[in-house]
Amino acid sequence: MKKGASGYGFNLHSEKSKPGQFIRAVDDDSPAQRVGVKQRDKLVQVNGMTVIGMQHSEVVAAIKAGGDETTLLLVDAEADDYFKRCNVLPTEEHVSGPLPEPVSERASEEEEEEVSTHTHTHTQIVAWKSPTDSLWTFLVAD
């Protein structure tokens, strides 16, 4: 996403009751609005770097480090919930590649037969072996 005359056109905030960085507002006719950024989207990556667990000031600095252009990976609440059920942190690979399966579905399939790793991405396989405690869902604003 290229910066406009007034910046990217979104406000980022964090909440004490909910971990992460979220879009508070999107300006009309801004670069952010034109690429599909929505209010309440959760920011997962900035320029390919995961921002989960980072302080607000660090995330803002990462966005500014991109200069006049930045790439954001955002997830809406529904996608966030889905990836949490899968115990997978969303990445840009998930935008066009295969999606992981929720853990409960995956566990029952694995009990019935051994899972072939040839049909799954590296991220999925690693997630099965070492699931994370928190996860999210997304849009790549490029």
Image (cartoon, rainbow, N blue to C red):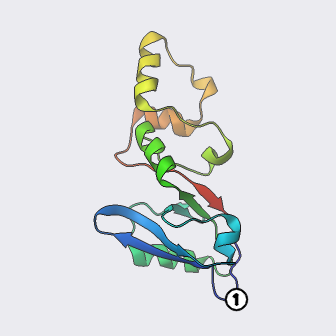
Left/right placement of residue 18 relative to residue 25 reads: left
Residue 133: x percent and y percent?
34, 46
Q: Which residue is farthest top?
A: 112
The quadrant the N terminus occupies is bottom right
**x, y percent for residue 82:** 47, 42
Q: Quadrant of the C terminus?
A: bottom right
Seen at 52% across and 67% down, the residue is: 39
Mark 1 residue type: Ala
Q: Residue 73 location in percent, x, y?
A: 58, 59
Residue at x 68%, y 80% (from the top left corner): 3
Residue situated furthest front in the rendering = 28
Image vertical order of residue 80 relative to residue 121, above or below: below
Q: Is residue 142 visible in this depiction of the protein?
A: no
Tell which of 33 and 133 is nearer to you: 33
- Give the answer, above or below, for where 1 lies relative to 128: below
The residue labelled by disc 1 is 5
Q: Residue at x 70, y 89 (%)?
A: 5
